[in-house]
Amino acid sequence: MFRILANSSTKQGQRVSSKLVQHNSPSGRLFNTQSPASASKNANSSASTILHDEEPPRPLRDFNQKKNKKNFRPYFQVQTPEDSAFKNELLAFDNYSSQNTTYDLSSESVTYVSPTFWDAIIGIMPIYRQLLESGELTSSRVQNLVSFLRNGLRMNRLELKKLKNKPDFDSSSKNNQMYEFLLSSVREVSNDLLDEKFSPNVSLTSLLIDCFRDMQLPEEAISFWSNGKQIPNLTEIFEGQMVLGAVLPILADAHEANFDELYPKYLELQKNVAAEHKVLHPKFLLGMIRVCLSNNKVDESLQIFKSLVNNLYQNNDGKTPLPHQKSNVTMAHLSFIGYCKNIDTADVFFNDAMDNKLPYHTPLQLNFINSYMNNTWEVTRDFERVKTIWIKTWNNYASKKYLPRMISSSFNNVFFNIFFQKYPQYSAESIKELKQLIVSYSQIRPLDEPFLNVLTSKCQQWRSLEVIDSIQEAYKTYNIEPTLVAHRCLLKALGSVDVPPQRIQQTFENLLLLHDANREAFLAPADLTSLKSATIRSPILDELPGGRDERVKLFFQLFKVYGPYLKSTKALDRWIASDIEQDPSLAVWYKSLGSLDVSKVNRLNLPRMKRNEQFRV
C-alpha cells in the first residue's frame, strides 16, 4: 500500500462553505437442490440454483463471559481528598467508572468487560447529578463518565448485532431502552458542559462529539461544537486539535469543510509544531484526511497519511504503538477505502487491507465497504468491479467465526441496490446474472434469511411473480424460518404483481400469527406499512386487470379488524393524512370505515396479543 504514496492522481474538488473558518422473459426459477459444484457449473442454465447444507455460523458468546484481565484499569484513576464532604459519592462514582470496558477499533473486539457493566452504567448517572453542584467533578472524572457512556453505545450495538431479529424501532426492547438512556445521558453531559457546570478538557469534549457521531446525530455534533466555540471560556478547548479532529469528518460529510480555507491553516500549524520538534495530534491528521478526500484532494490526503504513519512508526522512539494509537491509522486507511473517489487509489487500500500484511490491523468495516461499493458504481458504472468487491469482502467475512445477521442484510442491501440499477428490467441477461450471484454467494456461505429478504424486497421492480415465488420456495428448501421481516418483505413484493387479494390477506394473517407465536403484544407500524405497500400503495394498483377496488377494500377491511392491535394510535391521523394526500380517493374510504362490512373477514384467534381500546374507526 505504501507504494501509492509516491504516485497518485487527484480530481479537482468542489469548493464548499465552512463553519470552521470562522474560528478555524426468461425463467424466473432461481433455486434448486443441486450441489454447489453442480450449481456453479450449470449457473448459465435457466433452472440453475444452489443448495448449501452447511451448519449456520455459531453465535458469539455472551460478552459478560469474557475473563477479566488482572489489574486492568480501563479508566483514569483520580485521587479523592480524605477531607472531602463528598468522599463517599466520589468513591462510588469512581467505583462505577472502574466497571468500564475497552474496545479495540483495529480488531473490532471488546478486550475487557466487567460482569456488572450495565448495572454500573445505569447507577453512575444519579451520582453524577449529585456531584455536579459540589464543584468536585474534575474533567478527568467526567471524561471517565463519557468514555463509559460511549462504550455503552458500542456494547449495546454489539449486543443488538447478536440478536436473531432486530427489534422494531418503536418497540420497548431492552436495547432500545438502553439506547434512549445513553442518548439522554450524553445530551445531559454535553449541555452541562456548555453551561460551564464543570471544567472540560479537549479529550472529554472530543469524546462527546464522537458519541453524537456514533449515534448518527451529525447535526447535534455540529451544533454542540458550534455553540461551544462561541463561549469565551471554552473557545480554546473547542479549537483544540483533538476536538477539530473529531468534528472535521462530520463537517466533511455535511459538505461544510472548505479545503481551500482549511488546508493552508493545516500547513501553517504543521510548520509551527515542527519548529518545536512536536507532531500534530493523530486525530487532527485523520480529520484533515477526511477533509481532503471529501474535496477529491487525493495527493494531499496521501501526504497527510504518510505523516500519520511516520509519526506512529518512525518518530515514536522505538516504542510499540498502543492499540488506541494504531486505531487512528486504521481509521485513516479505512477512510481511503470508503471516501476516496479516485477508485484506483481506493482499490489499493482495499486490497492491502485484504492481504492483512500491514503493520496495523485493518478490519473491513461495513460502512466503509458499503461506501466503497457505491463510489465505485457512481464513478465507473462498472458492475464487474462492484461485484469483485462484494465477493472479496464476503470471502473475508466468511473467515470470521460469527457474522451478525445485520451485516448480511446491510451489505447485501447496498450491493443489490446497485445490481438492480444495472439490471432494472426482467430479462434473460438479468436473471442469468442473478443466478450466478446466488451461486457465488452460496459457495462462500450458506444462504441466509437476510439475503433472501433483500432479494424479495429488491426484485419487486421486475414485477415477476415467478421470481418472487422462487425466492419463497428457497426459505423451505434451505430450512430458513421466515421472521417478521421476511413476511413484511413478501407483503411489499406482492404489491408489485397481479395476485388474488386472498393471497395478500393470507400473507398478512401469517404475519399476525407469527406476532402471536412470538408473544408480541401489539402490531408494529412496519406491519401496517407493508400491508399498505401490497394494497393501497401498490405501484400497479391502477394497472390491475380487475381494477383497484378489490385491493383497496381488502386494506380497509383488514385495517378495521386488526387496527386495534396497533400499540399506539398517536400517528394514525398523520398516516391517514399522508394516504389521502397521495391518493385523494381514499378519503371516502376512511370516512366510511365505521360502516364498512367486515362480517366475511376471517378473525384470527390471537390469545397473546392485546387490543388497544383507544383505537377508534
Image (cartoon, rainbow, N blue to C red):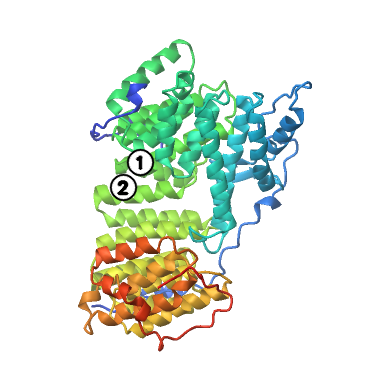
Instruction: Point out residue 59 in the picture as x, y percentages from the top left corner.
Output: 60, 61
| Most foreground residue, 401 or 222 | 222
Q: CA distance from mark 1 to mark 2?
A: 8 Å
Question: Which residue appears at 70% of the width and 44% of the height?
Answer: 114
Instruction: Point out residue 500 in the picture as x, y percentages from the top left corner.
Output: 32, 85
* Tag shown at residue 339: 1
Query: How many neighbours does mark 2 have within 10 angstroms: few (below 14), some (14-19), or many (20 or more)?
Result: many
Question: Which residue appears at 45% of the width and 79% of the height?
Answer: 509
| Most foreground residue, 200 or 135 | 135
Q: Which residue is mark 2?
A: 375
Q: Is residue 305 left or right of residue 384?
A: right
Q: Please say whether residue 44 is visible from this viewpoint.
A: no
- Label 1 sits on what residue type? Tyr
Callouts 1 and 2 close, C-beta under 8 Å: yes
Circle 1 SS class = helix
Q: How many marks?
A: 2
Q: Quadrant of residue 146?
A: top right
Q: Is residue 443 above or below residue 517?
A: above
* Tag shown at residue 489: none
